Amino acid sequence: MEVAPPLRGPKPRWLIGNLAEFRADRMAFFTHCARTYGDVVPLRLLNHRVLLLSRPDLIEDVLVTQSKNFIKHFGLRLYKPLLGDGLVTAEGDRWRRQRKLSAPAFQASKIAEYSKVMVEATQRMIGGWESGQTRDADVSRATMEIACNTLFGADACPNPEVVGEALIDAMEALTRRWARTIPLPAWFPTPENRLFRRATRTIEQLVEGIVSRSRSNSAPDRANLLSSLLAARDENGSTFTNAQLLDEVRTLFLAGHETTALALTYSLYLLATHPAAQSKLREELDSALHGSPPAYADLDRLPFTRNVVTESMRLYPPADFLGREAVVDCTVGGIPVRKGTNLFMSQWVMHHDARYFTDPQKFDPDRWTPAFEKSLPRFVYFPFGAGPRYCIGQTFAMAEAILCLAVICQRFTFGVDPNFNLELWPGITLRPRTGMRLVVQERIPVPPGSR
């Protein structure tokens, strides 16, 4: 019987293992490990055993074939103070129930209804932009308004920026807490703990007020997710409690707003640094839309716009890695995995792997031809996760990103602020540390014509 060679990896330090390298720059660390030691690399983070997997068949085995043998990894569970037991963190029967109840809100017919909200929110956002401005290209104002309107309905959340700022504060506070050499408990009055409590209190008060008004509304708007969740019933007739609704809404706020905002932000940055791609995108928009605002029915007529978003999420995936923890002893690709071992799979590593992407550091939307996509192994490109727990809002997020990008690029062109340097800040999502400063120039609009 052939014995597999022992796994090789970076030497762990006493007590902390590989934690210092992970915290210093986890994307560079994961890339170094995969390129130096191979597709399965053993690591240790404090007392947590980790295997870094960088081969698509192994990733499929964990996320699909043996998904019942795993739960979310220990790192994500650290964010439960923010997300509660929402779709991202829930496990087992609770997760299956929540997924089933939430699914109808993300059907194609619903997304078509939401598309007008997406376009109008983006138009309002850029309404205050002026030609020649150097401005932060963070588009979270529009994506937060879209999230508020589709979650709660029009006018339910009159000041979406308050929610957005509170979510960002909460994420940053948690990231700083766990970046400490010895994380202090939540009750200890550190600056990040105080910031986190203020942020979560703001979110809870706002959402609880909206939920309370929705429960008492005799004629609720059924075209939003909250109304669907309020109306949902289990087989025994039970409904979501307020606490459960709060968990779901916080999770959907973060997932539904942050992912699309990041995809749009990086798309604009990449277009600004690649004028030829920006020119090609404008030509597609002018030819397909003739100056009219984009609509859901136009999505199939904007293949290059879609490719820009797809390629931006390859280079800058909204989440740079995901993980699972084994709940039983099992075997993955012939490798024994003990109960309690965490398996990490990095979108950053896979999306930049030269085995699958020619010139992987290059921004090349044209690489996404139908033939290329068909040839690409499954689980090489997975910005929205994969398997039973793939992002339920994937179709929603892609439609939103394409429509919003089309609205913005119909009216403006972009250049890079010469004083700006992109610095990535990986937390629960992969964010630009200091925003994204671009120079905007208003285009000469194409007169609307027959379509």
Image: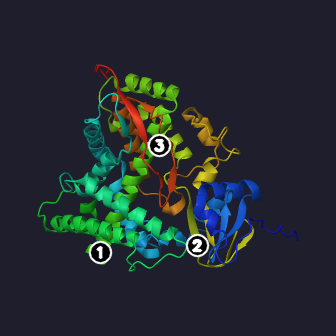
Residue 75 visible in the displayed image: yes
Residue 303 in picture, x, y percent from top left: 47, 33
Q: Label 3 belongs to which residue?
A: 266
Check contact, mark 2 vs mark 3: CB within 8 A. no
Q: CA distance from mark 1 to mark 3?
A: 35 Å
Q: Label 2 belongs to which residue?
A: 325
Describe residue 93's horizontal placement relative to residue 329 as left or right: left
Q: Which mark is residue 234?
A: none
* Mark earlier in primary sequence (2, 3): 3
Kind of residue sitting beneath label 3: Tyr
Q: Closest to the observer: 154 or 239?
A: 154
Check contact, mark 1 vs mark 3: CB within 8 A. no
Kind of residue sitting beneath label 2: Glu
- Asked if 424 appears above or below 7 in the picture, the reply is above
Residue 94 in picture, x, y percent from top left: 41, 74
Give the quarter of the image for residue 25. bottom right
* Mark earlier in primary sequence (1, 3): 1
Q: CA distance from mark 2 to mark 3?
A: 31 Å
Residue 114 in picture, x, y percent from top left: 29, 46
Camera-side mark, 1 or 3? 3
Q: For mark 1, give the secondary structure.
A: helix
Image quadrant where one finds the N terminus? bottom right
Image quadrant where one finds the C terminus? top left
Q: CA distance from mark 2 to mark 1?
A: 26 Å
Residue 72 visible in the displayed image: no
Residue drawn at x 81%, y 69% as measured from the top left:
6
Camera-side mark, 2 or 3? 3
Describe residue 309's horizontal placement relative to residue 26 as left or right: left
Q: Which mark is residue 243?
A: 1
